[in-house]
Amino acid sequence: MIIISTEGTVTEQEYFNIFNSENTVLHVKVLKDMASDPNNVLRRMKRYLDENPLQDKDQAWLVIDKDRWTDNQIRPLYDWSRSLPKYGFALSNPKFELWLLVHFEDAKGIKSSRNCSERLERYLPGYNKKVEPLKISPYIQDAVDRAEKRDRPPCTDWPRTTGTTVYRLVKELLKDAADS
């Protein structure tokens, strides 16, 4: 099982639910609520893990956007992720939609959140935070490859400029799905 605490309340859950399948023992559980600041994303995960300790092969990940959050607000999530090998942290700068965009293109030249949304609209006309699995699923490995290539050398904590480390989580999801 992979537990994911997200900042977003719609897009991230819909995206990560793509990995849940009747044909695999991999189970992705997304924790979310309306309080989306980094502190609440971490608090939600800690509360869940207090009540549901991870099993041997389980992992717990925090997924947030850079948005308007400061480094001081993000640092505790990163520090938590470093406290155990089965914890992870993924950040998209400027927002999660950058991760969706790299399913279709390299996302070069993205300068703002709005610019990211406009570019994504080219591939997902009418996009309104809802993820359509049939339009995204065929390109998951492409997204991993593009985001990983962009992350050279790999950032040690989180992308300070346009980029996403969600590929690290998705690589784990793909690996676990293949192992099951």
Image: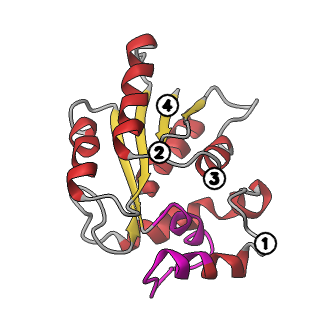
Inspect the image, locate mark 3, and give the three-letter code of the amino acid beneath it.
Thr
Mark 4–mark 1 distance (CA, rounded to whole Å): 30 Å
Instruction: Please provide the residue range marked out in magenta.
Output: 95-117
Q: Residue 103 lies in what quarter of the image?
A: bottom right
Decide: marks 1, 2 in contact (CB < 8 A)?
Answer: no
Which part of the image, by quadrant, shows the C terminus?
Answer: top right
Q: Mark 3 points at which residue?
A: 11
Residue 159, percent across and down?
Answer: 31, 65
Q: Which structural element holds mark 4?
A: strand
Left or right: 51 in relation to 176: left
Q: Which of 109 and 95 is in front in this view?
A: 95
Kindly report which numbered mark, 4 or 3, lies closer to the viewer in this rendering. 3
Among the two numbered marks 1 and 2 on one chain, the one whose residue lies closer to the N terminus: 2
Dot 1 amino acid type: Gly
Instruction: Give the alpha-carbon distance from disc 3 to disc 2, as whole Å.
Output: 13 Å
Q: What residue type is labelled 4?
A: Ile
Q: Residue at x 42, y 83 (%)?
A: 111
Report the coloring of the rendering: secondary structure
Q: Which of marks 4 and 2 is nearer the N terminus?
A: 4
In the displayed structure, 51 sits above or below 15; it is: above
Label 1 with label 3: CB-CB less than 8 Å:
no
Identify residue for label 2.
36
Residue 126: mark in rendering? 1
